Structures are given as structure tokens and as C-alpha cells.
Image (tube, rainbow, N blue to C red):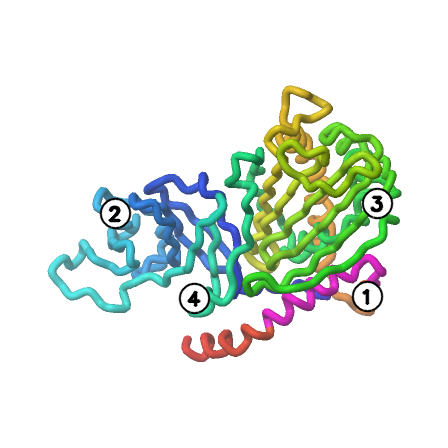
């Protein structure tokens, strides 16, 4: 497998709602597209091509004026909230070309996250962003990690998240052990609101928890259900439920005997070699940790989780570095637990094939 480009006709996270203060310009790159984003005084989040229509200067380096227009820092051209140029200082009385406007990008803000569609805007209603209800629900305590620019193709993170047989040896001593590798894996597939998903399901009985999980969730020996679901190319949802043997089944919620988390990951491609990785860790608000009873399970886990992330980050960098060499007879060997990884690739590659006609048309127009 070579590096897999990211499909554009899908939703990607560009930040949490709290990241977008009113009248603050921010620059992003999503799927090789430079984008300027800001929240208006009316509370809406807008996104446009980050290049001034005049000389390509990044508008995210400009400023928002008192009247709500965006002023380019190079020549002072101003854009209104529809993306049209309304003021040109160098010829204030002259006509303004109808081409002096910005390309908009669809944005949806829901459940505490802001999502952007970098592809064909006319197709943005064919899929909806995955729901993340725990982030906005007071019944859950949620910690949002800092965004990480990760020097690796986004698909490497997706495969890392779907395949927890790497918990040994990569995470041995914190969240992993060799027994985890032997847990049987079931596969589930389907479609939700236009998004094809693939999910792994691992269930174990009388499983002795690794040290970090005992610290966060109390129980040393548990029955456990662990799912990892790629909900769309930009988002993976992980749910872990633990309970004393014979007690699993009531669900993870406030007041429940079950302990565990909902751990969500967004992977937003910058280009073929980089992506922005964000994680969101939620536990029921009344679940306190064993390692520090003064901390909720979410806050305790989030304080220790960066150690785990650093190990994954290192592994992704090492994998990415190997793509600089030609295959020359090299071929990846797939193992039985890799079925979800293969399906994830197939889903993404099908999305890319569906985008090819519009990419060809776009190139012809240029």
C-alpha cells in the first residue's frame, strides 16, 4: 500500500466549539485546502478559501473590522460575510469584479465540535457528521486533548485505532498486555446518515486489567466489551465498558456499576503526509478514579493518556518514514485481526473513486 489520499467529500473536525471565539480569525489546512475560519457576532462559524482573490495573501493573517468585514493585511481588500469583496482601497469608486469573491466551505457545529466539508459543497447534504453527544452532555465529564500535528498519513492513525493488537508490545505496562492480543475480534459494518462505518468488537471474561485501566476504572478483574468504530474517514469512536465478572450489561452511564470511557479521535488530513489528531475522553460525571479519588475518571485518565499517545505518535512517525523507500518487492502481510483495517482502506478507496470524475472536471476547468 502506498500513501492513501484523503477523500474530500466528507466531514472533518476543525476544532471544538470553544476553540472559536467571536471575531477571531483562524487558519486551517484540510485536505490540501487553505481555509480561514471565524465566528461572527451572530454566533455562526464561517469558512472560506484562505487566499485573497487579489494576490493570494492568507486572509487568516488579516483582521476583522468593526462592521464585520474581513480586511486583507496586504492591500486592504475587504470581504463581507458572504465572501464578496465590498471595499478596494486602491480604487474606491471603481466597479468591483464579480470574480472578487471567496470560495465558501460548508460548516456544521454540533455536539461541541465544528466540522468542515472540504469537497464539493453541493454534495455536503449527502452525509452528516457523526454525533458526539457526550461532549455536550452534563451527565458526562469530558476532557479534550490539545490538537497534535502528526507527521504521518491519516490512514496510519485509523489503522492504529482499529487494531489494538499493538497494545502489546507498544503499550505494555500502561494500557496493554499480551493477553489483549488474543481476545477474539468480531466485525460489524453498516451505514449511518450517509457514512459507511466499520467496527471491531472485542469481548473478554475474567480479564485482568492492565495497570492504567485499574487506576482509572477500579476493577482489577473484569468482563469487558471494547469497540472501535471508524465512523467516517475523519472520526473514530472507541467505547470501553468494564464490570466485575458476571455484572456487565447495564450500560455505561451516571450511577452505573460499569466503568469505562467513550474515547473519540478526530483525524483531519492536512496533506498526504500530515494530519491533525485530536482526542476527546468522556466518562460518566460521577465516576471517580481509583488512582486519585479526588479526580473524575475522565480527568485522571486524561492526565495519564498523553503517555499512551506519545507511544502511538512515535510508531506513526516510524511507519511514515518507511514510505520514502520504494517497495521493490516488499509487500505488507495481513493477519487475521487486520480485517477491519482492510475494510477501512476499501471504504476510503471507494470514496476516492467516486470523487475522480469531479476532480477531472475541476482540472479541465483550470
Quick one: label 2, few (<14), some, or many (20+) residues within 10 Å?
some
Query: Where is 179 relative to 196, above or below?
Result: above
Residue 351 part of the magenta-drawn span: yes
- Position of residue 359 relative to residue 100, above or below, is below
Of badges 3 and 1, the one in the foreground is 3
**Residue marked by disc 3:** 204
> Which image quarter holds the C terminus?
bottom left
* Mark drawn on residue 121: 4
- Nearest to N terminus: mark 3 or mark 2: 2
Q: Is residue 205 left or right of residue 132?
A: right
For image coordinates 81% across by 66% down, the residue present is: 331
Quadrant in the rendering for residue 330? bottom right
Q: Which dot marks residue 68? A: 2
Q: Nearer the viewer, residue 71 or 278?
A: 278
Residue drawn at point x = 85 percent, y = 40 percent: 177
Q: How far separated are the C-alphas under marks 3 and 4?
A: 44 Å
Tell me which label, 3 or 4, sits earlier in the chain.
4
What is the CA distance from the residue labelled 4 to the residue labelled 1? 39 Å
In terms of depth relative to the viewer, which is nearer, 160 or 260?
260
Please state if 52 lies on the left or on the right of 234 as rendered: left
Q: Which residue is mark 1?
A: 330
Q: Position of residue 271 (x, y in %)?
A: 56, 58
Q: Secondary structure at mark 3?
A: strand
| Snapshot quadrant of residue 94 | bottom left
Relative to residue 239, is residue 330 drawn left or right?
Answer: right
Q: Specify the farthest residue to the left.
A: 93
Q: Which residues are magenta?
A: 333-352
Residue 238 position in % (x across, y down): 67, 47
Q: In the shown orientation, is residue 56 left or right of residue 265?
A: left
Amino acid at each position: 500500500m502506498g500513501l492513501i489520499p484523503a477523500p474530500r467529500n466528507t466531514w472533518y473536525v476543525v476544532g471544538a466549539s470553544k476553540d472559536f471565539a467571536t471575531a477571531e480569525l483562524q487558519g486551517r489546512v484540510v485536505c490540501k485546502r487553505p481555509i480561514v475560519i471565524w465566528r461572527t457576532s451572530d454566533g455562526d462559524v464561517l469558512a472560506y478559501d484562505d487566499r485573497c482573490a487579489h494576490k493570494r495573501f492568507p486572509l487568516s493573517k488579516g483582521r476583522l473590522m468593526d462592521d464585520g468585514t474581513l480586511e486583507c493585511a496586504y492591500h486592504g481588500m475587504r470581504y463581507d460575510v458572504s465572501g464578496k469583496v465590498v471595499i478596494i482601497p486602491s480604487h474606491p469608486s471603481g466597479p468591483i469584479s464579480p470574480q472578487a469573491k471567496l470560495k465558501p466551505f460548508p460548516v456544521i457545529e454540533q455536539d461541541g465540535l465544528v466540522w468542515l466539508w472540504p469537497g464539493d459543497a453541493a454534495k455536503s447534504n449527502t452525509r452528516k457528521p457523526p454525533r458526539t453527544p457526550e461532549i455536550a452532555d452534563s451527565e458526562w465529564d469530558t476532557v479534550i486533548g490539545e490538537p497534535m500535528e502528526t507527521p504521518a498519513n491519516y490512514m496510519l492513525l485509523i489503522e492504529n485505532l482499529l487494531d489494538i493488537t499493538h497494545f502489546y508490545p507498544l503499550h505494555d505496562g500502561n494500557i496493554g498486555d499480551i493477553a489483549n492480543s488474543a481476545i477474539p475480534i468480531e466485525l460489524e459494518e453498516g451505514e449511518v446518515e450517509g457514512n459507511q462505518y466499520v467496527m471491531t468488537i472485542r469481548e473478554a471474561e475474567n480479564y485482568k486489567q492492565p495497570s492504567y485501566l485499574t487506576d482509572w476504572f477500579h476493577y482489577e478483574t473484569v468482563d469487558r466489551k471494547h469497540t472501535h468504530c471508524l465512523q467516517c474517514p475523519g472520526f473514530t469512536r472507541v467505547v470501553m465498558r468494564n464490570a466485575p465478572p458476571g455484572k456487565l450489561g447495564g450500560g455505561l452511564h451516571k450511577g452505573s456499576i460499569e466503568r469505562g470511557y467513550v474515547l473519540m479521535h478526530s483525524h483531519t488530513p492536512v496533506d498526504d503526509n500530515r494530519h491533525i489528531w485530536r482526542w476527546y475522553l468522556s466518562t460518566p460525571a460521577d465516576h471517580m478514579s481509583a488512582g486519585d479519588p479526588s479526580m473524575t475518571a475522565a480527568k485522571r485518565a486524561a492526565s495519564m493518556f498523553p503517555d499512551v499517545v506519545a507511544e502511538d505518535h512515535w510508531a506513526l512517525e516510524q511507519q511514515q518514514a518507511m514510505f520514502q523507500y520504494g517497495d521493490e518487492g516488499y509487500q505488507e502481510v495481513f493477519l487475521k485481526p487486520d480485517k477491519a483495517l482492510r475494510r477501512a482502506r476499501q471504504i476510503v478507496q471507494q470514496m476516492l473513486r467516486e470523487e475522480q470524475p469531479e476532480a477531472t472536471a475541476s482540472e479541465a476547468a483550470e
